[in-house]
Amino acid sequence: MSESKTEKGLIFDIQNFSLHDGPGIRTLIFLKGCFLRCEWCANPEGQVFKSEMLFDNRKCIRCGQCIKVCKNSASKLDAGLNKIVLNRSICRLCGDCINVCLAGARSISGKWYSVSEVIDLVLQDETFYRNSGGGVTLGGGEPTFQFDFTFKLLKELKRYNMNTAIETCGFIEWRKFKEILPFCDLVIFDFKHLNGKKHEKFTGVSNVQIKRNLRNLLDSKKNIIVRITLVPGFNNLEDEKKSMIEFIKAVREDVKIEFLKYHELGKFKYTLLGRKYEFSK
């Protein structure tokens, strides 16, 4: 399979032996880039469509090696704070500091992969998929953000008779959404809120297109799981849950709905990215 640079995708994580994002044993592929900016996002490293430096100051032993090798002087010792600080605006992500970091406090989130490179990785666990009825799930971020790569990867996975799933927020033109559906065995739809104003306030985007796509998906009889993370102060009130259930069931009674508990497991990632976790319950 010949591939150009434009056919590569930016991926920030690949997890093997997942059991919670589709049937059987699965490989989860997390793509960078997202249309939404949910305040409680558990994968903030998936929001921005570019590689980013993760810097864990808790691990840093202030050996100064990063300062010595940085050609752009992006790392400096702050004597007042007694810690090394990273100027992300001038960091070129060359990786030199990662190579010399004695404490393993640095890493880069986001690596470019071709479709064939992902397929090669996936096929290493093919036996587990076959024996468990598992496969591959694309998440993120938002997999449809990198639409061309996602489309080509799903299409290629089906050439190998892989069970495929995508986890999506549904914020995409329906005409494009329809293009990838024939290559998806399962759509896991992350539904946030029925109220448009509240949805836009907490996620940064309108939910008009999202609701339209959810209706279309439900009408299509596609295999779909609707997931709703119950976030305190956002959508966990009984009337909010009830309205979302009624909206879904009015279109398709037999659809599976999963309620997930809000957690803060991704909160420290914001610190690693040099950002502030804005959400408060």
Image: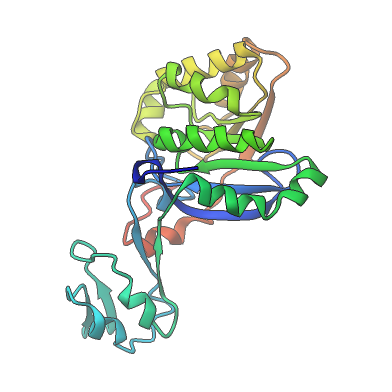
Q: Is residue 54 above or below residue 208?
A: below
Q: Is residue 45 above or below residue 107?
A: above
Farthest residue toward the bottom? 63
Residue 27 relative to residue 71: left or right: right
Q: Is residue 67 above or below residue 4?
A: below
Q: Is residue 214 visible?
A: yes
Q: Residue at x 78, y 44 (%)?
A: 130
**Image-quadrant location for residue 6:** top left
Picture colour scheme: rainbow
Q: Tell me where residue 4 appears, x and y as whole percent.
A: 37, 43
Q: Is residue 234 visible?
A: no
Q: Tell me where residue 73 appears, x and y as whole percent.
A: 17, 76
Of residues 232 and 13, which is closer to you in this image? 13
Q: Tell me where residue 273 appears, x and y as whole percent.
A: 35, 60
Of residues 131 and 120, which is closer to you in this image? 120
Of residues 199 and 11, which is closer to you in this image? 11
Of residues 109 and 36, which is closer to you in this image? 109
